[in-house]
Image (tube, helix red, strand yellow):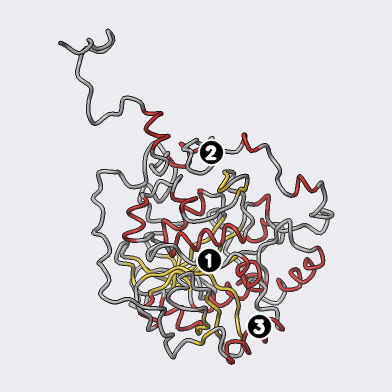
Amino acid sequence: QQPPPPPQKSTSAPNPTQPQNNHQQTSNQPKTCQLPTPLIQTNTPLPPPLPKPTYSFYQRVLPKTLTSFTSLEGKTRFAQSLQSKHAESYFPLSQQFLTQMDPAYCGISTLVLVLNALAMDPNVRWRGGWRWYGDESMLLERCCLEEERVRREGITLEEFGGLARCQGVNLVVKRPLESDGCDDVSLNDEGMVVKSTMQSEFYGIDEFRRDIIMSVQMPPRTRWDDDEDENDNDEAVSIIPSKHSRPEDDGDRTNIDSHNGGGYFLVTSFARYALHQTGDGHFSPIAAYHASTDSCLILDVARFKYIPYWVSVKDLYDAMIPKDSATGRSRGWVLMFPPTEKCGVSKNSGNHQAGSIEAREGKRPAVCVPLTGSGIPICPVEGIKVEYCSVRHHSTDDR
């Protein structure tokens, strides 16, 4: 009793390391990276799993150096920020505010929050007929980062920028000045921008404060915004000197002018322990600024741990200086713009809500839109994005 002979075209034994049906394997394992070359090769050892907890907690007590958003002082600051138009970003961000689904998912969860606040269309169905960034799996399923690796060690500032760019976001990454006064750092004529031999860009606290103020006064506009808000956003731009409030137009940076009057959201990556919190690196967006106390409102995506809080700009800036052990570089902040064609509304563009309801709602036949988890490629330039991904090539220039 012998088994049937193998097909004529293959007389050798199958290689156990190679699947016999690649298409079937892809469809059965939708969480597997769909890109031809993962950001981190599968033979790269995973970091050890997070240690099992010794104790269980119901949130953490906020350090005394931080001010609770819901305290009397926190409410007063917020009311004054609203009056001075330094809390315009709060509304689009709070509409999408979420809780990170895993202890190490702060970067992924923050990106999901901002993508929805930017009204970005994922072009895949999350549930039913709805195209939406419903949770972190929407990014990790089609990402060249391994999900288990992210669960164990989170993501770096460079990886955050790479993931955002893959979703179509335009962004600018900035880092704080090094506190050790490196020899390869020098100020420019304006005394703000500093470049090192690694082509990274470092900025002082004044630049950080200006970026915060611009972001909270002038969030990105979407097709759902009211027309009457447009003039308010235009007035906000003139409050800050233009030469300091936007990145230099050096050919490699995103220029605010090119966005047709649109604004951006600001995400900060900082060391928790520098703010007397428990934990290490963390990502979260900034939603408001209070001028008289020079503090900003952090919408902490680890809502199971800390409620939203006000922190002084100086303390937050200092908390971005400690180096990330994974990269050997300081953390920083990210200015996140929507794609150019979605940014801002020109005064001469007419009614940005023009068109049918179906067009505004992006109505499409469901059969034409893949369901998340199906493993069906949706991006025609996936190969190009992977080939030229600066993070994948471990580039030292995160811009």
Q: Position of residue 342 (x, y in %)?
A: 68, 52
Q: CA distance from mark 3 to mark 1?
A: 22 Å
Using residue 356 as the reference point, say whether residue 392 is left or right of it: left
Using residue 156 as the reference point, say whether residue 130 is left or right of it: right
Neighbor class of circle 2 (other Cα within 10 Å; few <14, some 14-19, many 20+) is: few
Q: Camera-side residue: 365 or 270?
A: 365
Using residue 199 as the reference point, say whether residue 225 is left or right of it: right
Q: Camera-side residue: 141 or 164?
A: 141
Picture quadrant where residue 291 is located: bottom right
Neighbor class of circle 3 (other Cα within 10 Å; few <14, some 14-19, many 20+) is: many
**Vertical placement of 64 versus 328: above or below?**
below
Which circle's residue, 3 or 2, is located before the other in the chain? 3
Which element carries disc 2, helix, strand or loop? Answer: loop
Which circle's residue, 3 or 1, is located before the other in the chain? 3
- The nearer-to-camera label among 1 and 2 is 1
Asked whether the residues under the numbered discs 1 and 2 touch, taking CB atoms below 8 Å apart as contact, a structural biologist would say: no
Residue 245 numbered tag: none
Q: Which residue is mark 2?
A: 379
Q: CA distance from mark 1 to mark 2?
A: 27 Å
Q: Which residue is mark 1?
A: 98
- Name the kind of residue labelled 1 in the image: Leu
Q: Which residue is mark 3?
A: 81
Which element carries disc 3, helix, strand or loop? Answer: helix
Q: Total number of numbered labels?
A: 3
Q: Camera-side residue: 58 or 183?
A: 58
Q: Position of residue 368 (x, y in %)?
A: 62, 34
Picture quadrant where residue 250 is located: bottom right
Residue at (23%, 50%) from the top-left corner? 45
